[in-house]
Amino acid sequence: DTEVTQTPKHLVMGMTNKKSLKCEQHMGHRAMYWYKQKAKKPPELMFVYSYEKLSINESVPSRFSPECPNSSLLNLHLHALQPEDSALYLCASSDVGKRETQYFGPGTRLLVL
Amino acid sequence: GENVEQHPSTLSVQEGDSAVIKCTYSDSASNYFPWYKQELGKRPQLIIDIRSNVGEKKDQRIAVTLNKTAKHFSLHITETQPEDSAVYFCAAFQTGANNLFFGTGTRLTVIP
């Protein structure tokens, strides 16, 4: 399996909702990433997990809460989001020792109303 | 962190013509330069990459060149086809930050 999968594909939520994005890979990668991509912009790194431990948090607001329950799964818990958080959220994975070669999931397109 | 600049932001070419997209980077310690293709609503897909110890790499109609001294690298697509239409992102892997830094993207349109 050489794919990174993400669910859901689309998500609409209100500013008071709590929702979660999920990411899964079975390539044996022990580094996983969350990126945020606004329209016509490049992906922006949010979080990096290495061996299931958070290694990088790029000053992301606390309304985004990542979780890595095991080596194949990565979640992003969302709470009290703002309309400006609407974006495509991409998950990626890589070997820990080869973090330059990242494989991206298809993303979750999030709309916050 | 690393600063990657990419030009042009949009590029239109006739089918069969060549397309060239250029990127510059700021940190001489960056050592790996991938190119991603992102079709509308889809994931970024790695299409070609080059390491800092190589000057040029080719894969069928796609080639990447790297000039370490000038800190710039370019993507060359020959014999363009409509299915090449997409947004292309360059990136640089900065060893200090141990992260990829992306360029701002080029929207390529191949006109049939």
Image (cartoon, helix red, strand yellow):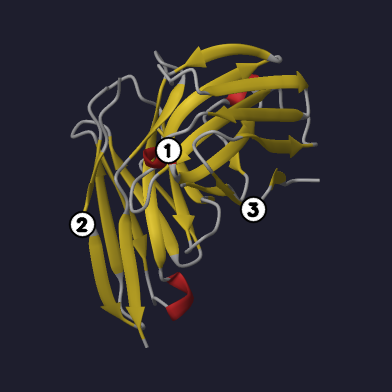
Q: Residue at x 37, y 44 (%)?
A: A42
Q: Quadrant of residue A98?
A: top right
Q: Label 1 neighbourhood size at 10 Å, few (<14), some (14-19), many (20+)?
A: some
Local SS, label 1: helix
**Image quarter of residue A101:** top right
Instruction: Answer above or below: position of B40 versus A95.
Output: below
Name which quarter of the figure residue B27 lies in. top left
Residue contact between numbered discs 2 and 3, judged by CB atoms under 8 Å? no
Q: Are marks 2 and 1 in contact (CB under 8 Å)?
A: no
Q: Amino acid at mark 2?
A: Pro
Q: Which chain letter matches label 3?
A: A
Look at mark 3 in the image and give the residue it sits on.
A9
**Residue lying at 64% horizontally and 33% vertically, measured from the top left:** A93
Image height check: is A42 above or below A75? below
Have a look at marks 2 and 1 and say if they share a chain.
no
Marks 2 and 1 sit apart, C-alpha to C-alpha, by 27 Å
Quote the CA–CA distance across marks 2 and 3: 30 Å
The disc placed on residue B55 is none
Q: Which is closer to the viewer, label 2 or label 3?
A: 3
Say whether marks 3 and 1 touch (CB < 8 Å).
Answer: no
Residue behind mark 1? A85
The residue closer to the viewer here, B105 or B73, is B105
Read off the residue under disc 2.
Answer: B8
Q: Chain of mark 2?
A: B
Q: Residue at 35% of width from left, 77% of height from top?
A: B110
Is B20 left or right of B62, judged from the image as shown? left
Camera-nearest label, 3 or 1: 1
The location of residue A92, given as percent across then percent down, is: 60, 36
Q: Residue furthest front?
A: A16
Q: Taking B30 as reference, is B50 left or right?
A: right
